[in-house]
Amino acid sequence: MENVAEKTLADKYAHIKGWGIDADPENEPTYPIKHWTGDDHKRINWKRPPLQPVNIEVLHSIERPNITAVFGTSSPPSGLSGAIRRYAFKYSEGNYAHWFALVLADRVNMVEGIIDDIAHGHFPNFFKERGWTAEWKYNRKAMITKLAIGAGVLIGVAAFLYARGGKKKSLL
Amino acid sequence: MLAMNFRGPFRVRIDRKPYPEILHPEDAIVRVTRSCICGSDLHLYHGLVPDTRVGMTFGHEFTGIVEEVGSDVTKLKVGDHVMVPFNIACGTCSFCKQELYGNCHESNPEATAVGGIFGYSHTAGGFDGGQAEFVRVPYANVGPTVIPPEMDLDDAVLLTDVVPTGYQAAEMGGIKVGDTVVVFGAGPVGIMAAKCSWLFGADRVIIIDHLEYRLEFAKKYAQCEAYNFRSLGDPVLFLKKTTDYFGADVCIDAVGAEAAGNAIQTILGRKTLLQGGSTTALHWAINGVKKGGIVSIVGVYGPTGALVPVGNIVNKGLTIRANQASVARLMPRLIDHVLSGRINPKEIITHRIPLEEVSEAYHIFSAKRDNCIKTVLIPPRAA
Ligand SMILES: NC(=O)c1ccc[n+]([C@@H]2O[C@H](COP(=O)([O-])OP(=O)(O)OC[C@H]3O[C@@H](n4cnc5c(N)ncnc54)[C@H](O)[C@@H]3O)[C@@H](O)[C@H]2O)c1
Ligand SMILES: [Zn+2]
Ligand SMILES: [Zn+2]
């Protein structure tokens, strides 16, 4: 198979003196990670596996012509984050617009997640979700210090705003 | 069923999700028996991987019992207890045919630069992962391997990611008998890479990190030298001095995008995402290796650009070798290493946590609390 392909190429380039004379199959820096078969030169024309039916929205990289034979169905694009993701997929993987738009979509998606939770009557338990029960168990001292600093800053800001509010009133 | 549910950076919880379905004739449904948290999951957990959608279930390092198979599945039957490689691979594309199972072209529509991976954002195909009671396993004829009856389940689960990744890190290093190998990162992957470097005939194995408890463990488990970069001053200078001012023969980056040790890198790569991760460890690897040496990268980075000293790669004539581990390729060899006692993977497990406590488990592994090295989640209905 491989030799036929090489023979054909050798014929094709018969007019180039020395074509392929130094080609060395042993010079394969990716071996043993890759077992070179020559299939690469057939490009994407392998016999494809059966195709998973597409009945959700699947965004695909514009660097490929189609959707892969299988794909995940975890969380199809939806809402504002979905719209941003669709925009992102107008750009190739080499383009910053693609990745920055996706990161932006992720942050928007996080807020959508909170809204969605509340809409379903579930106020997210941030303390629990962040695994802070474990922090309380294994790093209590540092956690108390952090909480105290946080509370201190909050009280400071509140006091400052209160004082400013007072001043404004006295100016009136 | 119970499944981990991602809600945004640093926020995950256990939730009820519908039981997965067969969506393709080569699918299997597997009831999970063990599922690890990997260093790679931390990149998702910290919000560093673009297109990590709210509602996704993570988990790409797991074992389970086959519950259901699609019409074209011939290699597995209901009841088989299998280890499932983290890569989703079709077995028929050009890349799979050449055993690049981590680079399959028929498993991830969202990106061409990475093959499908279980529970690893939509950038890796949008598959729900194994930190759940059940999981859909595509291409069940290619990846999953029946666990040999004499193998411990805790060893088996580590053969789906951390062992092959550590092994391939050493393999890609092209280690020659007598070489000095330097491994950056004493996490599960780095520890395994150090351990496997001996199998290729290294004469000196050095591991570098800044977490004392991990260095202590690595020193014993991988029988190697261990150094804390916080007390080394300049790690590159240290490596030059300790190799008679020659440079290491091989450097392995088992840290990836969340490397500590350089403020500018941390700001660009971790805080602002202006580059695809912090490349501090990779910098040290490139500068600390000898001329004509090999740098093997298994640490994971983001898809955008990142600062590395390209000029030094050129001028030193370095070979950079990198990939996602090709788990299915390495499986037979590694099963042999484990069964013959050359590698004892389960010794790196420090935490066994019920799946229901997934939020705490993530926090402990991410914040490196309680001397955590490797965490395994155990679903309530595990064997
Ligand atoms: N290529 C693959 O197939 C593959 C598979 C699994 C994991 N990974 C990647 O391998 C990397 C390690 O995984 P892990 O599970 O061991 O993660 P981990 O987070 O437990 O370990 C990373 C270690 O690196 C240390 N570290 C941080 N900055 C450092 C620096 N500048 N120099 C040296 N050490 C430093 C940390 O303290 C930590 O101990 C991650 O990036 C992960 O995504 C790749
Ligand atoms: Zn992993
Ligand atoms: Zn493939």
Image (spheres, rainbow, N blue to C red):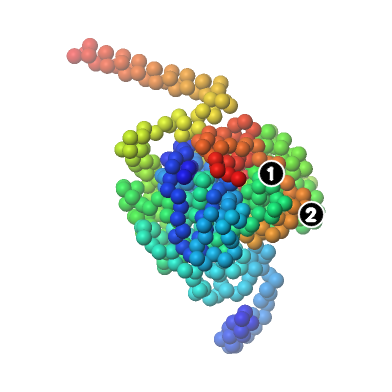
Name the mark on residue B201. 2
In the image, the residue with mark 2 has its CB under 8 Å from the nearest atom of ligand 1: no
Label 1 sits on what residue type? Lys
Residue density around tag 1, few if under 14, some if 14–19, many if 20 or more, within 10 Å: some
Between residue B203 and residue B49, name the one nearer to us. Answer: B49
Label 1: chain letter: B
Residue B307: x percent and y percent?
Answer: 54, 49
Residue found at x 45% / y 50%: B19
A65 displayed left or right of A168: right
Residue B267: x percent and y percent?
Answer: 50, 39
Residue found at x 59% / y 58%: B144
B71 displayed left or right of B294: left
The answer to the question of whether label 1 and label 2 lie on touching residues, with beta carbons closer than 8 A, is: no
Between residue B369 and residue B267, name the one nearer to us. Answer: B369
The reply to whether residue B241 is in sight is: no
Label 2: chain letter: B
Q: Give the total of numbered labels.
A: 2
Residue found at x 49% / y 71%: A48
